[in-house]
Amino acid sequence: MTARRAVNGAAGFWAAFAGGVFGANSVPHLVTAARRGRLLTPYGGQDSGPVANLAWGATNLTAAALLTARALRAGGARRAALPLLLGAAAFGGWALLYEKVLSKRDS
């Protein structure tokens, strides 16, 4: 394996992983926007409304699409699938930790 191929493989792995994180993060924000709820975003703070959640969800979805496309170019679908799922799972773990432990500190 050449050094260039190894770098492309690592870049593809991390692009797919980040794509999974951003894709998973887009879901709660888009759902919150659709139900006209409120959820923390960088755009509107702790009590962000539907418009801020729609914008943040769309930003995350766009980032996920771009990163996943980069990963697919770097290594193909077979090599991108596992890191994409790992990224989504990592976000899910973070969300669970935040909801069950960290958000309780602020109350």
Image: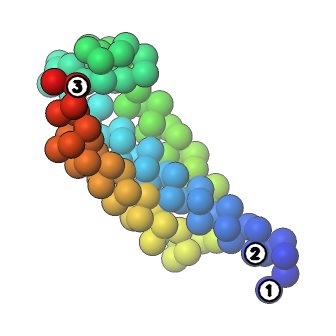
Amino acid identity at mark 2: Ala
Which numbered disc flags the more N-terminal residue, 1 or 3? 1
Image: 49 above or below 41: above
Quarter of image, res 75: bottom right
Quarter of image, res 87: bottom left
Marks 2 and 3: which is nearer the front? 3
Q: Where's residue 9, x and y in %? A: 68, 71
1 sits left or right of 39 in the view: right
Q: Where's residue 22, x and y in %? A: 44, 44
Pointers 1 and 3 in contact (C-beta within 8 Å): no
Image: 11 above or below 96: below
Q: Where's residue 92, x and y in %? A: 29, 52
State the residue in front, 66 or 105.
105
**What residue is at 59 percent from the left and 56 percent from the top?**
15
Q: Residues within 10 Å of mark 3 (few under 14, many from 20)?
A: few
Question: Can you tell which mark lies on residue 40?
Answer: none
104 sits left or right of 46 in the view: left
Which numbered disc flags the more N-terminal residue, 2 or 3? 2
**What residue is at 42 percent from the left and 17 percent from the top?**
43
Q: Which residue is mark 1?
A: 1
**What residue is at 60 percent from the left and 71 percent from the top?**
76
Marks 1 and 3: which is nearer the front? 3
Residue 70 visible in the picture: yes
Q: Residues within 10 Å of mark 1 (few under 14, many from 20)?
A: few
Question: Can you tell which mark lies on residue 106?
Answer: 3
Amino acid identity at mark 3: Asp
Amino acid identity at mark 1: Met
Q: Which residue is mark 2?
A: 6
82 sits left or right of 49 in the view: right
Pointers 1 and 2 in contact (C-beta within 8 Å): yes
Tell me how far mark 1 sits from mark 2, CA to CA. Answer: 7 Å
- Which SS class for mark 1? loop
